[in-house]
Image (spheres, rainbow, N blue to C red):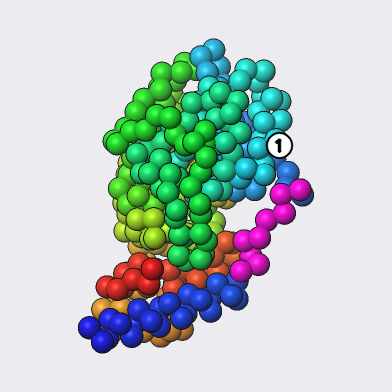
Amino acid sequence: MNLFRSRALMFAALLIALQTWYAPSYAQDFDKAVVKTEMISPNLYVLFGAGGNIGVSVGDDAVFVIDDQYAQMAPKIAAAIKQITDKPVKFVMNTHWHGDHTGGNEAMGTAGAIIVAHDNVRKRMSSDQLISLLDWKVPPSPKVALPLVTFAKDVTFHINSDEVFVFHVANAHTDGDAIVQFRKANVIHMGDTFFNGLYPFIDTSSGGNPDGVIAVANRVLELADDNTKIIPGHGPVATKADLKTLRDMLVTVTMRVKAMSKKGKSMKEIVAAKPTAEFDEKWGKGFLPPERFVASLVGAYMPVKAK
Ligand SMILES: [Zn+2]
């Protein structure tokens, strides 16, 4: 018990230190943010701006949008969608509850879009939340920003000459993740279960789990072929090979962290052992620097979590 308590205290102390060191790295300047549009299939687009990558499907039936970044980005996103289509947005699919993917919901909902998400997204957006790794307190969202339609397992949209299969995956980036597969276009939006080229943030305070992220990667690797275009939550559009690289990195690093944790090594010792060393050049320059990524994994596997 004492060992658990001291490890938990050390974990909390290290998290506070890490938050202080790296706090500026996730500050955003929305005035300067530019929305870039990339066409990846005849009627499918990706919008990059500030926050999570947005998918846009257009066609005869509906404008179907996956995620909508931050509230501050709403006018720029609306303008970028207008460049693609004159039609209003009919559906917004949220891949999970985080504000860099759902912040635009209020504007979208007010304009008449029907917001769809997993049951747990609506639950978390309806109540006070704390993202403990970032020490972010998030208040409940206004009613118009909440998903109007929720699902437990999966849902299919028959739109724009495609079959859009949306399925929930258990405890990965959060406890409300949805993967969106455009079966005909051969495109998969993975939300934040895939950070392409940067260490993944796994929100254990929202029910996320590193082993769940590995499980999602394995499931999507089975669905994908060499022509599949994969839209990650963050980073550039990816291939099956890119997703395999993430999976292999995560398997290697989590195995090392688990082994050291099992031997009773402390958070500090595990971070100092640099279990990500050979991956840092490729993955360590993004949102989470190596030390924070390792600390988050140790926290996820510790028997007593700092909350
Ligand atoms: Zn997220």
Name the residue rendered at 38%, 44% in the picture. 123
Amino acid type, residue under disc 1 in the picture: Lys
- The span picked out in magenta is 23-31
**In the image, 155: left or right of 32?**
left
Which residue sits at x=62%, y=17%?
87
Residue 185 in picture, x, y percent from top left: 47, 26
Can residue 207 be seen here? yes
Within the image, what quadrant is residue 286 found in?
bottom right
Q: Residue furthest right?
A: 32
User: Does label 1 point to a residue whose CB lies under 8 Å from ligand 1?
Assistant: no
Q: Splitting the image into 4 quarters, where does residue 246 fall?
A: bottom left
As for residue 25 lying within the magenta part, the answer is yes
Percent of width and height locating residue 30: 71, 49
Q: Which residue is found at the position 53% from the left and 79% from the top?
A: 17
Q: Quadrant of the C terminus?
A: bottom left
Q: Does 24 sit above or below residue 31?
A: below
Residue under numbered circle 1 = 76
Element on which disc 1 rests: helix
